[in-house]
Image (tube, rainbow, N blue to C red):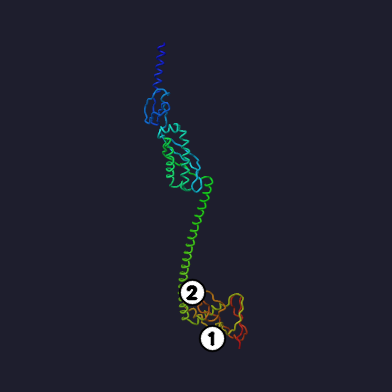
Amino acid sequence: MNRLIILAVVVVGLLYVFVSSVFIVNEREQAIVTRFGEITDVKTEPGLYFKVPTAFVDNVQIIEDRLLRYDIADMRVQVSDGKFYIVDAFLTYRIDNPRLFRSRAQGDLRVVENQISTQFEAALRAVYGLRDFTAALSEERPAMMREARDLMRPEMASLGIEIVDVRILRTDLDAGVSEETFNRMRAERLAEAALLRARGQEAALTARAIADRQAVVIISAARRDSEILRGEGDGQRSEIFAEAYGLDPGFFEFYRSMQSYRTALPGTGTTMVLSPDSEFFTFFQEQNPNGSAPPSASVIENIPEIELIEEPAMDSSVLDDNALTGLPLETDVAPPEAAPEDTASEPLTSVPADAGTETEVAPANP
């Protein structure tokens, strides 16, 4: 029985010695071996290692050999022109020198992260403080991150820490700066819109001026062509009147007189007092001033039809022969009635001008 107990104690002791003298380092870790508090060895390669048994002599501290990350959020930084940004950033680091890490930071990551926090904020403030408001949102951003990393590396290297990279996640405007920036951007957009409207109005005025000028040119050309056509028409009309006058001058004078009666004696109830010997009533007498009788119906019927051009009515106040020139001809005209035999025996002669109109003619003065 005693032998069994002694054997068991020996086996347990051997197991303890074996277990306490063996330690394993994997690919994500490093090991610091200390003897009585002094660093005797550093294991950076993965594998199975031995040390003096028990923790009273040799002690092993396992530390990280991976990239570690530290984040900073909602940091308020000021740029060179006095405005503020709200920044989110992070950095990656690793324990590059385990001996320094053990001796300077007691091998404690919390001590390292406290130092990283201080150095990180100082580096970001320095980087942003050297630049203006728009630099953080421009192509200078990668240079700013590299500059912040380089500012931290010397201080952290003294703790055995290597700063691998610095990244800026977010750069937002402060609330007051954001409102000010929004107002400024709105003013810029309004100014740009006003400029675009002014240019549009200028283009519209230019186009309208060109269109007005083209309209004046087109109207002038149309008026010119119309005057040319009117002149040609007037010439044709004169030729037609000349041909008609050459066919029968007596009928032409008679027709012109009838047209003057129609124009001068409208149905307005107006009374005109004229001498019966006036040339205006030549065809109301037995003979005209030339001593010839009015054209007969047979003469009127034998006149060929001539296509005439209508003309506007003449002014009733102008009744001389020169004003009557140019009146159109009509082919369907009834022969005039015979004049009264004795026009001198009556003091006044009534000539019907139109429906409801009577013209009184005074006798000629002796």
* Badge 2: residue crowd in 10 Å (few <14, some 14–19, many ≥20): some
* Alpha-carbon span between mark 2 and mark 1: 30 Å
* Badge 1: residue crowd in 10 Å (few <14, some 14–19, many ≥20): few
Drawn side of residue 22 relative to residue 365, left or right: left
The residue lying furthest to the right in this view is 347
**Amino acid under label 2?**
Ile
The residue lying furthest to the bottom in this view is 366
Q: Dot 1 corresponds to which residue?
A: 289
**Amino acid under label 1?**
Pro
Between 350 and 100, the one nearer to me in the picture: 100
Q: Dot 2 corresponds to which residue?
A: 309
Quadrant of the rendering where the C terminus is positioned: bottom right
How many numbered discs, if any?
A: 2
Drawn side of residue 219 relative to residue 348, left or right: left
Question: Is 126 placed above or below 217 here?
Answer: above
* First in sequence: mark 2 vs mark 1: 1
Where residue 178 appears, as percent x and y from the top left, is 52, 47
Question: Is 212 placed above or below 270 here?
Answer: above
Where residue 282 appears, as percent x and y from the top left, is 55, 83
Between 17 and 292, the one nearer to me in the picture: 17
Question: Is 268 placed above or below 39 here?
Answer: below
Dot 1 lies on which element?
Answer: loop
Q: Residue at x 49, y 82 (%)?
A: 249
Dot 2 lies on which element?
Answer: loop
Whether pointer 2 and pointer 1 mark residues with C-beta atoms closer than 8 Å, the reply is: no
Between 262 and 321, the one nearer to me in the picture: 321
User: In which image quadrant can residue 358 be found?
Assistant: bottom right
Where residue 209 appears, as percent x and y from the top left, is 48, 64
In the image, which is nearer the foreground, mark 2 or mark 1? 2
Quadrant of the rendering where the N terminus is positioned: top left
Label at residue 213: none
Where residue 78 appears, as percent x and y from the top left, is 50, 45
